[in-house]
Image (cartoon, rainbow, N blue to C red):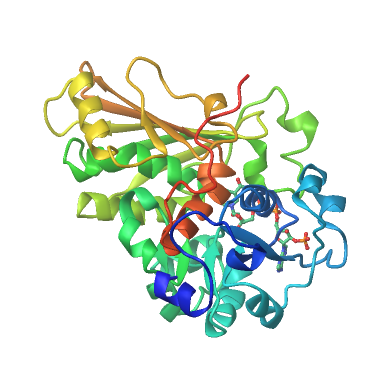
Amino acid sequence: VTAEGHRARGVQVGGPVRGPDQALLPVAVVGATGYAGGEAVRILAGHPRVRLSYLASHTRAGLPLAAVQPHLRAAGDLSLAPVDPERIAAAAEVAVLALPAGASAGLAPDLLARGCRVVDLGPDFRLKDGEAWRRWYRSEPAAAEWRAKAVYGLPEVRREEIAGARLVAVPGCYPTAAILALWPALASGLCHPEDIIIDAKSGVSGAGSEPTAATHFCEADENVTPYALAGAHRHTPEIEQELSLAAGGAVTVSFNPHLVPLSRGLLCTCYARLARGADGAAATALYREWYRDAPFVQVLSETLPSTKPTAGANACHVAVRVDGRTGRLVACAAIDNLQKGAAGQGVQALNLMAGWDETAGLGRLGMYP
Ligand SMILES: NC(=O)c1ccc[n+]([C@@H]2O[C@H](COP(=O)([O-])OP(=O)(O)OC[C@H]3O[C@@H](n4cnc5c(N)ncnc54)[C@H](OP(=O)(O)O)[C@@H]3O)[C@@H](O)[C@H]2O)c1
């Protein structure tokens, strides 16, 4: 979305928004009944430059949004409408899609063909390699043309590309934390690109709002469970795709996720072999320099990241340590999986696409306790 494009359409860009509702950018949320879509609505309802113009549900069109998302009652008199590309594109300049894997592959190109920009919170356009999609998702990939054109939406490493994109593939929650934890070390040659271990923990909302046996209260509460170990998790190829770009050569990772008894929150602890001598202070200084202009990444030095301080905020807390005894770099990142891990990051990308301040409408302060 260029500033010129908005002006041509009568949408206000630049400067504070003072006018009536029509001056705001009309945005649709498709999948507004889910966890990620609901969080997108929560953020966008308070965004100073956005008007929620269409909220779509696959199976619950016709219901008031508050019937499904009672915490959003004060967002206004909002109702759910069908997932109809013609109506969505007529109502909105940008559509945020928060749909299960495979559901955006057909819808996004349809919206794009009708002139609507797309911020996809799902995985359909993240992998450039169609074979990798087939292997991990066991289905046909989205159209090669749009996979090639989609910009992987991690603003901390791809700010300019996102600003010019029509389709942004917002990273998954685990990849966001893992990539932000490892990118500076790989890009600067501080660690080796092979033999990287990512030990990850996610709260239960990461699995979506559809209940399963694993997310049943009695299974998830007071329990910590590994799952999809040893390269079985679908986020593995996405992490490797992006970290290979950081390292300038193939990176393979051992990515091992765990389900922990939290509603929100995700922590990655990453282990990599040091490629050159450095102590903790030097590694922290390197990370600070790398993220100097990244408003949502806080590099900690005295304390270590934990999930709770990031809850409700589009924040990533990162820390790095050097284990001189084993020659390993240990890097941690904590995020709220629904904020920096999904909807918050999606709005961060939307802000860049619209030519606005990256932080518009987004909170950087966590809720505590
Ligand atoms: N949860 C997270 O922490 C997180 C983080 C990063 C990325 N994501 C990604 O965001 C997407 C949504 O995740 P979620 O956790 O919000 O899932 P969710 O709570 O299960 O919500 C899924 C949404 O998709 C809609 N939907 C289901 N099948 C559909 C179909 N065939 N066509 C159109 N809409 C359909 C549902 O609508 P109705 O039920 O109203 O019909 C619902 O609104 C996923 O791709 C996920 O990987 C999630």
Query: How many numbered marks appear?
Result: 0
**In the figure, 98 relative to 149: above or below?**
above
Q: Is residue 127 visible?
A: no
Q: Is residue 303 above or below residue 261?
A: above
- Tell me what residue is drawn at x 80 percent, y 59 percent: 78
Q: Which one is nearer the viewer's eye here, 281 or 118?
A: 118
Whether residue 259 is visible? yes
Q: What is the x, y in percent for residue 141?
A: 51, 73
Give the camera-side residue of 31 and 102: 31
Q: In screen coordinates, is 261 left or right of 67?
A: left
Q: Quadrant location of residue 92?
A: bottom right
**Residue at image point 39% right, 50% down:** 239
Residue that appears at 50% across and 60% down: 136
Residue 118 image point, x, y percent: 53, 69
In the picture, which quadrant includes the C terminus?
Answer: top right
Residue 200 against residue 12 in the figure, above or below = above
Furthest toward the left, the residue is 277
Q: Quadrant of ligand 1?
A: bottom right
* Residue at image point 66% right, 54% down: 37
Residue 348 at what x, y percent from top left?
A: 47, 52
Pick the front one: 64 or 20: 20
Q: Quadrant of the N terminus?
A: bottom left
Residue 333 in the image: state x and y as whole percent: 42, 32
